[in-house]
Amino acid sequence: MNTEQKFLSRSEAETEALGAALARELGSGGIVLLNGDLGAGKTVFSRGFARGLGITEPVSSPTYTIVQEYELPGGGRLYHMDLYRIGDEHAALGFGVDEFLNEPGAVSLIEWPERIRGLLPDTAIRVELAHRSENEREIRIIRP
């Protein structure tokens, strides 16, 4: 049975704070799937999520690099993936997505996860971001 929480963010700072809170709750290990149109706030949420894990270096969208890796202060890694440019699961396996997803103690934050739907565990947390206005976003967090 899934549980769902819904939030209304009125600023980038609120979206970042929500990302940070989820990261602190999750701790090390886990997979978070980010869904939303271009410009919905996935990268802003990701920046807050990284801060919540204690990452202080700049966090940017991995649209062109596909994966950004960040060392976690207590050990382990955050893998921030943007699969927008990935065609399908076979292409993702070609760059080793399965290794990122299965690394013990690692956290994976995945934008455009529908590209690898068949590779994702049922235990992943889904975050759905939607435009409500120029500054407002509706954010739904769905836990398995």
Image: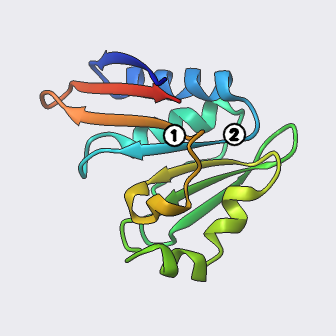
Q: Residue at x 65, y 46 (%)?
A: 57
- When the figure is inspected, residue 110 is found, relative to residue 137, above or below; the finding is below
Q: Is residue 55 visible?
A: yes
Give me the residue at 23% from left, 35% from top.
Answer: 130
**Label 1 neighbourhood size at 10 Å, few (<14), some (14-19), many (20+)?**
many
Mark toward the start of the polypeptide (1 vs 2): 1
Tell me the residue at 76%/36% (across/down): 28
Q: Residues within 10 Å of mark 2 (few under 14, many from 20)?
A: some
The extreme left residue here reads 133
Q: CA distance from mark 1 to mark 2?
A: 9 Å
Q: Secondary structure at mark 2?
A: loop
Can you tell which mark lies on residue 132?
none
State how many labels appear: 2
Q: Is residue 97 above or below residue 53?
A: below
* 126 w.r.t. 85: above or below: above
The x, y position of residue 39, in whole percent, is 25, 47
Q: Is residue 97 left or right of residue 27?
A: left
- The residue depicted at 33 percent of the width and 26 percent of the height is 139
Relative to 94, 45 lies left or right: left
x and y, in percent, of residue 40 in the image: 27, 41
* Residue at image mark 1: 47
Residue 138 percent across, percent down from the top left: 26, 25
Residue 10 vs residue 8, the one in the foreground: 8
Location of mark 2 (residue): 55
Q: Determine whether 126 is above or below 26 in the image.
A: below
Residue 10 lies, in percent from the top left, at 27, 19
Residue 112 visible (yes or no) = no
| Local secondary structure at mark 1 | helix
Front-lying residue, 104 or 118? 118
Identify which amino acid the numbered label 2 is placed on.
Answer: Ile
